[in-house]
Amino acid sequence: MKLYRSPAMPSHWIGEDKLGNLMQWPAERGGWEQRTSYTGPKRLLEEVPSALARGSGWPGGGRGPAPRAASGVPSKTIGLRVTDDERAKWQRAADVQEQTLAAWTRDELNAAADRVLGEADAARPRSKGKP
């Protein structure tokens, strides 16, 4: 089954159902439950990887949470064991910066890597949680 995106409907997925009919649904968790027939022009649709609709309930998207898109947006998980005190301290720092713990941690680790590698701060991408 194929999955599409439309520039006219950026917050929706458009994809084939099990019978090959084009359906549209909100690009959100469980959005497939709100599906309706797609009646727009097919030539304006851009085919995208079907895994992007994972988590929406679409039968062609597979199982599990939706992966993040490429283009500098985080896509892999790294596990790190920390003490309760370390986590609480990091959470307080993230709160001060008005970021999620994940975004704060990613920014701080990238800054540390830049210092060690001698790379310019401006060259590193900022996380979405950074104001």
Image (cartoon, rainbow, N blue to C red):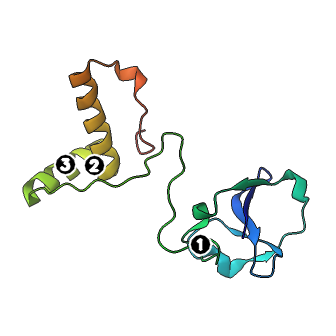
Give me the disc on residue 56.
1
Amino acid of disc 1? Ser
Q: Which is more N-terminal, label 2 or label 1?
A: 1
Circle 1: element type: loop
* On-image quarter of the C terminus: top left
Quadrant of the rendered structure where residue 23 is? bottom right
Left or right, 99 with respect to 50, comes to left
Give me the disc on residue 95.
2
Quadrant of the rendered structure where residue 111 is? top left
Circle 2: element type: helix
Residue 124 percent across, percent down from the top left = 40, 28
* On-image quarter of the N terminus: bottom right
Q: Quick check: can you spot residue 118?
A: yes
Left or right, 44 with respect to 118, comes to right
Front position among marks 1 and 3 = 1
Residue 7 percent across, percent down from the top left = 77, 49
| Residue depicted at x 10% and y 60% | 84
Real-space Cα separation, disc 3 to disc 2, in angstroms: 9 Å
Give me the disc on residue 90.
3
Front position among marks 1 and 2 = 1
Amino acid of disc 3? Trp
Real-space Cα separation, disc 1 to disc 3, in angstroms: 32 Å
Quadrant of the rendered structure where residue 58 is? bottom right
Q: Which is more N-terminal, label 3 or label 1?
A: 1
Verify CB contact (< 8 Å) between mark 1 and mark 2: no
Front position among marks 3 and 2 = 3
Amino acid of disc 2? Asp
Q: Which is more N-terminal, label 2 or label 3?
A: 3
Left or right, 76 with respect to 3, comes to left
